[in-house]
Structures are given as C-alpha cells and as structure tokens.
Amino acid sequence: MQVQHIGPKELKRILKDVGEDYCVQIPQPDALIRGFDLCLVWYKDALKFHTNKYSAEQTRCLSSIIKASKRLEHLLTDAAQTQMFRSPEVTVPCLRAIRSVREESLIELERNTKGPGPRYRANYQKRSPFEWLVAYFLPMVYLNGGFANIEDEKSFLGQDSPYIRFAMAAVREFCISNDGEPYARSSFIKALSNAFSDKVRRTSEQASEDSFARWRLRLMKNALWPELEGQAPI
C-alpha cells in the first residue's frame, strides 16, 4: 500500500489517540497537516536514499539517455543532410527536443555528483527510514506543534507516553507498515532509544552527522507557525 497523506479526518484520529489533555496549544489543523506533509516528504527521501541503489540507478539511466540522445541527433542530422525525408524541416523540432532532453539530463547528472545532493543523500544512510520518521521527523511536529511538553527521556520513552501514542497513530494514518503488519510498540521505543543514545545503523565519511537537522527544524517551524516567522512557541 502506498504511503498516504494525512488530512483533517486522519488528524482528528491522531489527536484522539494522543488525548485531549495533551493537545494544549496546538495550531490550526492546516498547520499540523503541513507539518505531517513535511515528514512525509522527508520519509520518502529516506526510502529512496537510505541505500545507494536509487542514486546508482538514476545515474545509469541519465547516462544512457545522454548517450542515446547523441546517437539519435547524429542520425537525424545525417537524414536531414541527405534529404531522406520529403520535408527535411520536420527534423528541426525533433533535434531541438533531443538537445533539450540531453541538457536536462546533464544538469541532473551534475547534481547527482556535485553540490549538496550527494551529502543530502548520504545523510539518510545513517539509519532506517522508519527510524528517521519516528525518532527525528515526527518529534519535530510534536515538540513544536503545541502538544504538552515531555520533561525527560524516561517520560518520552514510556510505554504509554503521549508521544508514543502520537507516533503510532501518525504511522498508522500514513499507512506505513512492517511488511504489511503494524509496527510493534517496541519498535517505536527502540527507534527513540537509538536516537537518544545516538546509535546509527550505517556510518560513512559523508554521513557522520546530521548536517541538515537545523534546516529541517527551520522548515518545520515555518510550516507550523508561519505567522511567527519560524519561531514556534517553547
């Protein structure tokens, strides 16, 4: 099943699971939905980039497009010069389209190998997509979304803590499962425990730390509290 967007109906079910007493200063529903949408975007990136498979396939595909476009351009140019077609001008828009596709492919290939792209992708190789979502993305919604404050790690990791209920409800509404089965409560607690102890599943020179944490937090605060210019209430 595909990952699902959280809308007003899904949000109501999440808030019900958390408990009314813990939804003390939450923003408008649309703001929380924007926060969940950000989590979903980052989770999908984590699914793509937690291994090198997606990037390697993308590079292979782009390289093939560039190579094939050059071959096709030469064939069409030769055909036009030898007047193979009754109307040689029909090749003009085709050649223009081929060159445009090649230029875009070259740009994307450049992004795959230089700039922030490789660092951003490598960042996701530190842990599983589920751990990213439960222990890093969703906590930003909870901690900056006006829910009741959780004082310490022990309270955060409690079997029936409001955050655990929040995360389990959000993952359920996203339709994210563990090979078709709901994730166990222990999986949520383990993901959070790993985050608190800073354990990582993979390490590499590029992904040694989460250099994008502040950027994500700024985007999340802007999504939840745009009228405060990114400064969510403490």
Image (spheres, rainbow, N blue to C red):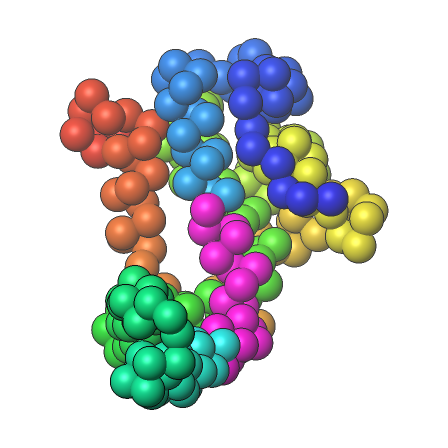
Residue located at (49% from left, 17% from top): 23
Magenta stretch: dominant secondary structure: helix
Locate residue 234: give its quadrant.
top left
Residue 204 visible from this viewpoint: no
Disc tally is 0
Span shown in magenta: 41-60
Horizontally, residue 181 falls left or right of residue 160, namely right
Q: Note whether 113 is above or below 162 in the view shown.
A: below
Indicate the position of residue 173 as horizontal and vertical percent values.
65, 31
Indicate the position of residue 168 as horizontal and vertical percent values.
66, 36
Relative depth, front residue between 200 and 78: 78
Q: Residue 76 magenta-drawn?
A: no
Q: Note whether 220 is above or below 183 in the view shown.
A: above
Indicate the position of residue 105 as horizontal and vertical percent values.
35, 72
Relative depth, front residue between 65 and 191: 65
Tell me the quarter of the image containing the N terminus.
Answer: top right
